[in-house]
Image (tube, rainbow, N blue to C red):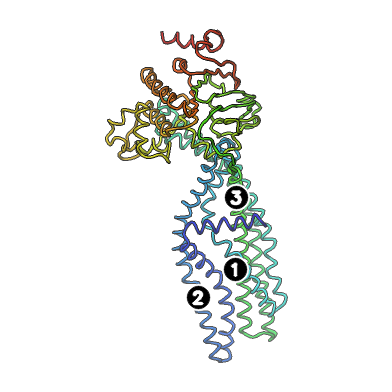
């Protein structure tokens, strides 16, 4: 019962978010189409009896009722079509916004890497428009049930056996539910293939991948794979649809049989002289109303089951994104540092752990460099430190307080990061940098651009107001290095972070630009020592990390060496070997 109530609240909330006025209009015109059959049935009896007996009052009363019913029948579809078009226009955006809120509003990101989350998300995106179309269900369903009950009671007064007429809907309802279960299972089964088709489409049309696709002549292969994925998805969906249609048709076939049986019963009573002509008209109209209501209930049952399925996806995704913030306040400065204590973490269900029990201490006020080969666990470490992932076991301590006890939103207000896989925001330059600190004043943007060495901005057509991205008419495309400088500037917008993370910040830069950048970043790190700021630098280029206060070597998720550049070179272990190999390559 609770899940049904939650589904009804979700639908009403969607309708209200679409727009109260439009929602109410849509509800009224939809309800009027359900009221008119019963109103017509009640009005036709006095009309027919009045015509037979010549009683003018009955003729007038019945005529007015029939006229109102017919007016609703004629006018309601016009209002319904008008309201439906506008509801669907807005419902699509509102439903999509709800899905985005679930997907992007969560404080952590581990659910994005779970196939079951992605499958549910794919299914919900497909079914979201139907949520918008069904916002009136909480009102319509009780109305139709009431119509069925009233019509049945009136029929029973004329002929008790006709009270059994609605029973024909029970097997049809069961069959409808069975058909919906088949459809629901097929949606989840087809979701991975649909996701694959969507990924292939996005890769095929993305400017960033166009060059590689053309050089490798992958166009035809991508097209074949896309066709194969969509064919597989369609095969799964169509097979289930065919079976569900057959099951549903068996249920629908019962209704005309029941209606014909009711007509025979009423005509027999009329032939025996036990009912009036008006009673016959009322019984025929009521039988039609009962069958219509039973049909509508069956139809609504299918809609309710589909909506329930979509709502279950919605609530399931909401559960995955649920977060209870810690109550311990975030300190204004660090005095001790950040410590990883026996932290384990792995992706998916793979037994291999990216962090198999990692211990690491990042002292306050220092610049720490993390080095290691690909797959050593450096990027995973960054995600753990920023709270994007929760460790399977162990703890991340911020000045001795478990990160799980802190409010992640407050914590991240004290964190800045420039990631290896940075986002290329197709906004203006100022906006693309400013999103790194939305709470900061606008004058922080030019300061951050200067610290990142993004001098090229002054040469753009509109400076910091230049639109980025060639998908816009006046958009400008940047080089890889220029995009990376904007990403670094974005990380520098916040003036006093307690943790500054720079993950491969110079991967797209030439050696001269890289050297100048690290001089500026080193100065920025020294400026933050008084607040206990930790600057964490992750890089494959050993020449850029040698000036760090502490260098940590990570191998298979474990810390194998730590010390200054001089200490590690003197030790002659992995760091010294890798540094010497890389230095030899520049000679």
The residue that label 1 is drawn on is 143
Mark 2 secondary-structure assignment: helix
Residue 224, given in percent of the width and then of the height, sits at 49, 34
Residue 416 percent across, percent down from the top left: 47, 32
Q: Residues within 10 Å of mark 1 (few under 14, many from 20)?
A: some
**240 on left or right of 446:** right
- Residue at screen point 54% across, 90% down: 57
Do callouts 1 and 3 mark residues in contact (Cβ within 8 Å)? no
Does dot 1 land on a helix, a strand or a loop?
helix
Which-is-in-front pick, marks 3 and 2? Answer: 2
User: Relative to 200, is 474 on the left or the right?
Assistant: left
Residue 280, image quadrant: bottom right
Image position of 259 with respect to 268: above or below? above
Q: Is residue 360 above or below residue 84?
A: above
What secondary structure is marked by label 3? helix
Q: Which residue is mark 2?
A: 70
Where is residue 43? Give x, y as percent.
Answer: 56, 80
Q: Residue at x 51, y 12 (%)?
A: 578
Image vertical order of residue 300 relative to residue 430, above or below: below
Q: Mark 1 vs mark 3: which is more N-terminal?
A: 1
Task: Name the N-terminal-most of marks 3 and 2.
Answer: 2
Quadrant of the rendering where the N terminus is positioned:
bottom right
Answer whether labels 2 and 1 touch (C-beta < 8 Å): no
């Amino acid at each position: 019962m609770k899940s049904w109530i939650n589904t009804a609240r979700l639908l009403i909330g969607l309708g209200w978010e679409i727009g109260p006025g439009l929602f109410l209009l849509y509800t009224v015109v939809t309800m009027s189409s359900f009221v008119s059959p019963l109103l017509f049935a009640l009005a036709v009896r006095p009309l027919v009896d009045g015509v037979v007996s010549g009683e003018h009052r009955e003729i007038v009363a019945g005529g007015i009722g029939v006229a109102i019913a017919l007016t609703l029948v004629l006018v309601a579809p016009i209002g319904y079509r008008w309201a439906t078009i506008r509801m669907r226009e807005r419902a699509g955006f509102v439903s999509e916004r709800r899905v985005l809120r679930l997907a992007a509003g969560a404080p952590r990101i581990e659910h994005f890497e779970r196939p079951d989350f992605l499958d549910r998300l794919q299914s919900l995106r497909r079914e979201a428009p139907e949520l918008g179309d069904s916002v009136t269900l909480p009102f319509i369903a009780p109305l139709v049930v009431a119509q069925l009950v009233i019509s049945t009671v009136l029929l029973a007064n004329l002929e008790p056996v006709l009270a059994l007429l609605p029973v024909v809907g029970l097997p049809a309802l069961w069959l409808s539910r069975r058909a919906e279960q088949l459809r629901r299972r097929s949606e989840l089964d087809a979701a991975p293939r649909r996701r694959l088709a969507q990924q292939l489409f996005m890769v095929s049309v993305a400017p960033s991948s166009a060059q590689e696709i053309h050089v490798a002549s992958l166009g035809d292969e991508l097209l074949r794979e896309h066709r194969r994925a969509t064919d597989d998805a369609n095969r799964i969906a169509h097979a289930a649809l065919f079976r569900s249609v057959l099951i549903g048709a068996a249920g629908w076939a019962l209704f005309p049989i029941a209606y014909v049986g009711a007509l025979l019963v009423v005509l027999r009573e009329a032939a025996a002289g036990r009912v009036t002509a008006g009673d016959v008209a009322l019984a025929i109209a009521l039988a039609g109303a009962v069958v219509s209501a039973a049909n509508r209930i069956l139809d609504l049952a299918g809609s309710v089951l589909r909506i329930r399925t979509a709502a279950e996806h919605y609530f399931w995704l909401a559960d995955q994104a649920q977060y209870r913030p810690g109550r311990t306040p975030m300190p204004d400065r660090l005095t001790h540092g950040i410590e990883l204590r026996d932290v384990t973490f792995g992706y998916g269900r793979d037994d291999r752990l990216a962090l198999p029990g990692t211990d690491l201490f990042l002292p306050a006020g220092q610049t720490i460099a993390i080095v290691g080969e690909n797959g050593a666990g450096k990027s995973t470490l960054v995600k753990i430190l920023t709270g994007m992932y929760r460790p399977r076991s162990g703890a991340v301590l911020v000045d001795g307080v478990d990160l799980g006890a802190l409010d992640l939103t407050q914590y991240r207000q004290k964190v800045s990061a420039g990631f290896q896989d940075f986002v290329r925001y197709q906004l203006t330059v100022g906006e693309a940098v400013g999103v790194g600190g939305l709470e900061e004043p606008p004058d922080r943007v030019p300061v951050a651009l200067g610290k990142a060495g993004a001098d090229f901005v002054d040469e753009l057509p509109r400076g910091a107001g230049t639109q980025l991205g060639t998908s816009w008419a006046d958009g400008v495309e940047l080089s890889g290095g220029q995009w990376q400088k904007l990403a670094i500037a974005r990380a520098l917008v916040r003036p006093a972070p307690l943790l500054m993370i720079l993950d491969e910040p110079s991967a797209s830069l030439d050696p001269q630009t890289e050297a100048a950048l690290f001089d500026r970043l080193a100065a920025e790190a020294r400026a933050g020592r008084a607040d206990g700021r930790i600057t964490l630098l992750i890089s494959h280029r050993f020449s850029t990390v040698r000036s760090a206060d502490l260098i940590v070597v990570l191998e298979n998720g474990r810390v194998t060496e730590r010390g200054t550049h001089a200490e590690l070179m003197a030790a002659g272990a992995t760091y010294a070997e890798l540094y010497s190999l890389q230095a030899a390559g520049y000679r």
